[in-house]
Amino acid sequence: MIKEVKIQDKQTLFDIAVKYFGNADAVFDVIANNNVDFSMKLSAGQILNLNDIEIVRNDLITYFNNKIPATDVENNEFSAGYSIGFSLGFNS
């Protein structure tokens, strides 16, 4: 059975995979079934078709049931006080 999912603002393919399948690896099925690739930025309102695949973590599905994961943020969207907490050391 195919389920249509409407993309919300700032959602990524990985957000969809985790929300609906409880598994980031499901991103490969989402990509294969929707003629998209990793580099494609999703648009709010875009429709993706999700096939039935094995759900790996029902607890994640339950957790995200009333939540919308949206992890596609730009660096300038973080607050000024946000710090990742480590340095890559490229500019030493």
Image: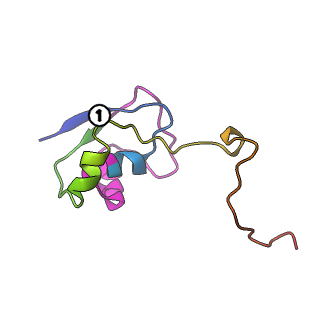
Q: Residue furthest right?
A: 92
Q: Given the image, on which type of amino acid does mark 1 rest?
A: Val
Instruction: Write down the region rendered in magenta.
Output: 19-47
- Residue 63 percent coordinates (x, y): 30, 47
Image coords of residue 82 (percent x, y):
70, 49
Residue 38: image location, x then y, percent: 47, 52
Image quarter of residue 92: bottom right
Q: Is residue 74 magenta?
A: no
Q: Which residue is mark 1?
A: 5
- Placement of 71 over or under 83, stated as above or below: above
Identity of the residue drawn at 42% across and 31% down? 8
Residue 32 in picture, x, y percent from top left: 31, 52
Residue drawn where x is 39% and y is 33% of the image: 7
Residue density around tag 1, few if under 14, some if 14–19, many if 20 or more, within 10 Å = some
> Which residue reaches farthest front?
81
Q: Quadrant of the N terminus?
A: top left
SS class, disc 1: strand
In the image, 76: left or right of 16? right
Instruction: Specify whether residue 20 is in view.
Output: no
State how many labels appear.
1
Q: Quick check: 25 above or below 42? A: below
Query: In the image, what residue occupies the spot 79% across and 73% down?
Result: 89
14 relative to 89 in the view: left or right: left
In this rendering, position of residue 62 left or right of residue 88 = left
Instruction: Tell which residue pokes out farthest to the left in this image.
Output: 1
In magenta segment, residue 31: yes
Nearer to me, 12 or 89: 89
Residue at horizontal 34 percent and vertical 52 percent from the top:
18
Looking at the image, which is closer to me, 50 or 81?
A: 81
**Residue 32 in view of the camera:** yes
